[in-house]
Amino acid sequence: MAEPEPSNQIEHSLVPLTKDQAKLLLEVGYLWLDMREFEKARAVFAGVSALMPKSEVPQLALGTLEFSAGKHDKALQAYRAAQKLAPKSALPRAYAAEALLFMGKVDPAMKEIDAALKAEPESDGARLATALKEACDAGALPPKKPEKRAKKG
């Protein structure tokens, strides 16, 4: 088997890994996630994270998985790990803001939104941050807590 082009290699991966192989692995995880097979998706994303320990992308995928499962605190932990790996990237900050909003922590979420907008103003992360801010301004976020019903009888 021929060696892949150096430009197609993932830098700092534990084993030689091409960008196409990494994308394929992540897509498998997202397919499991879409099928609500959270444990299978978690295993794939954790494996990709182990293969690519210096990339924030698998951490973002793990955060998305936890967020989808309703575990916003665990999602935030994964997004914070992604922030450490890519401190100048807006996307981990915007995702962290979303998790914070769903946790009802509006002030820290707004700080993350501002940081995302400053970090990369024209990026996907900034667009997500802007959408989150607009949703807050419109009253759609943070989500309202369901009212507890009084027990009858």
Image (cartoon, helix red, strand yellow):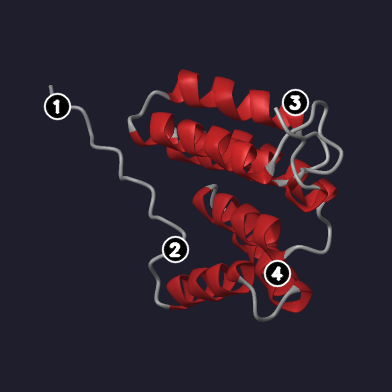
- Ranked by sequence position, the earlier of labels 1 and 4 is 4
- Ranked by sequence position, the earlier of labels 1 and 3 is 3
Residue drawn where x is 20% and y is 27% of the image: 151
Residue under label 2: 141
- Badge 4: few (under 14), some or many (20 or more) residues near its Cα, within 10 Å? many
Q: How many circles with numbers are drawn on the protein?
A: 4
Q: Is residue 146 above or below residue 142?
A: above
Task: Please identify, in this view, whether the residue under mark 1 or under mark 4 is nearer the observer.
Answer: 4
Q: At label 2, which amino acid type do we have?
A: Leu
State how far apart marks 2 and 1 are (Cα). Answer: 31 Å
Residue under label 1: 152
Q: Are marks 1 and 4 in contact (CB under 8 Å)?
A: no
- In the current view of this chain or complex, which residue is farthest to the right? 12
State the residue in front, 118 or 106.
118
Residue 50's label in the rendered image is 3
Q: At label 1, which amino acid type do we have?
A: Lys
Q: Considering the image in quadrants, where does the C terminus appear?
A: top left
Residue drawn where x is 71% and y is 31% of the image: 49
